[in-house]
Image: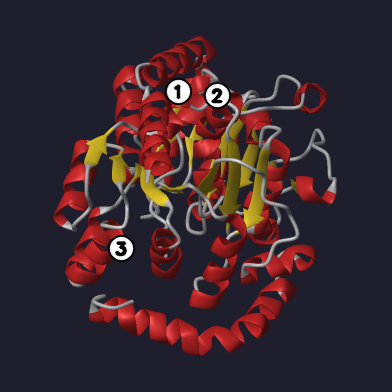
Amino acid sequence: MAGAPFGIRTYRAATTLLSPLAPALLRRRRKLGKEDRDRASERLGVSNVTRPSGKLIWVHGASNGECLAALPLIETFVSKGLNVIVTSGTVTSAELMQSRLPRGALHQFVPIDTPAATARFFAHWHPDVGLFVDSDLWPNLILGAKAAGASLALVNARMSQQSFESWRWARKTAASILSAFDVCLAQDEEIATRFRLLGARDVRVVGSLKEDAPPLPFDPAKLAALKSAIGDRPILLAAQTHPGEDETILPAHDALRSRYPRLLTIIVPRHPARGAEIAELCGTRNWRRRSAGEEIGPDTAVYIADTIGELGLFYRLVSFAFVGGTLIPQGGHNPLEPARLHCAVLAGPHTYNSATAYEAIFNAQGTGRVNSSADIVGAADQLLADPARAGQLGDLAAQGAASLGGAVDKTFQAVSALLTSHAAT
């Protein structure tokens, strides 16, 4: 790419030289369960799926969270008769999209970020518009899309202060990547400022797509089975947890069991593959794993819900929940998912990924921040002891979630403008 900054030219040269190693790397990842054996060719930019005729919108999200956030937008495109292809990079996100995408939308694995793989992808799909959800910025993918003639938008755009500081050391490289986007739709003004300072064009604040997402789906029969197994036992739910958080939740469970001997703690790890790891942490506590088909019994103390796509079940079981990724500097997972289901939210100090949503919910609830195992015990004890109060907080959380929204419509309007301008070129 003539005239590209040194960082881009170096990256492109390195990924070109390493391209012959890609098949071996993918084989190794398949052995670890990180790639789909039957769809390995997609990671090299080769597809067995025919491109639909007409205009094509390409939506890329790195993993589950980004793809789920984009679902309302994808559904809007399909309802308007537009063709959509969604790409992501993880096996779990592919499984999720296969079950959740509306009829008329396709899923493919994103090609690895080498010049050859991305070129094959664009030669086959020829997207008219490409939407990058959140902050998954791969240079060859983005610049290759631009070179192939696609109009590009960075949607639901997010950049942490830490990422911003890192990119500041490579301003020319950042500007080269970000200026490829015709529009950047940021979640809030603070984020928008970071993108502007790094060279993004036409930066607008439209809010978060997650704020417009529908309630999580659930299987009524499975919910009935869980309720039957649990009965009237008190529940402590820890959802979307990461390493370092289960070690805080389990001592809280122990402390609460001294007051609530029948307490059932349900842990839903962010990554289901961690089920065995959490079981080991449980030690002699009476635990069961959902992925193994093990059911909740009268003596089950900890239930490890290490499955995919069932979070909607567990939020519907409780009146409050701890949301993970917040006790460690992960940035926090989506608090709107429990709040929309009238489930009060507890979370740690690290909520920068969805700062606006957490602020709206905590302000509505008047509480919710926990920083330690002792804090979780204190907050959970109050809510377990007063179910009416817990229900009130859940209603307030729902009100806080409902106060946000509008990003899907604003994003759709921006993308429609890109499609119109693309047709004119």
The x, y position of residue 250, in whole percent, is 56, 48
Report the colour scheme: secondary structure
Residues 126 and 70: in front is 126
Name the residue: 23% across, 59% down. 164
User: Disc 2 marks which amino acid?
Assistant: Pro
Alpha carbon distance from label 1 to label 3 = 49 Å
Q: Which mark is residue 177?
A: 3
Which mark sits nearer the N-terminus, 1 or 3? 3
Q: Secondary structure at mark 3?
A: helix
Packing grade of label 3 (10 A; few <14, some 14-19, many >=20) is many
Residue 399 in view:
yes
User: Disc 3 marks which amino acid?
Assistant: Ile
User: Disc 1 marks which amino acid?
Assistant: Gln
Q: Secondary structure at mark 2?
A: loop
Which mark sits nearer the N-terminus, 2 or 1? 2
Mark 1, residue position: 382
In the displayed orientation, state which residue is furthest to the front.
424
Mark 2, residue position: 214
Which mark sits nearer the N-terminus, 3 or 2? 3
Q: Is residue 184 above or below residue 33?
A: above
Q: Secondary structure at mark 1?
A: helix
Q: Is residue 183 above or below residue 260?
A: below
The x, y position of residue 10, in whole percent, is 33, 84
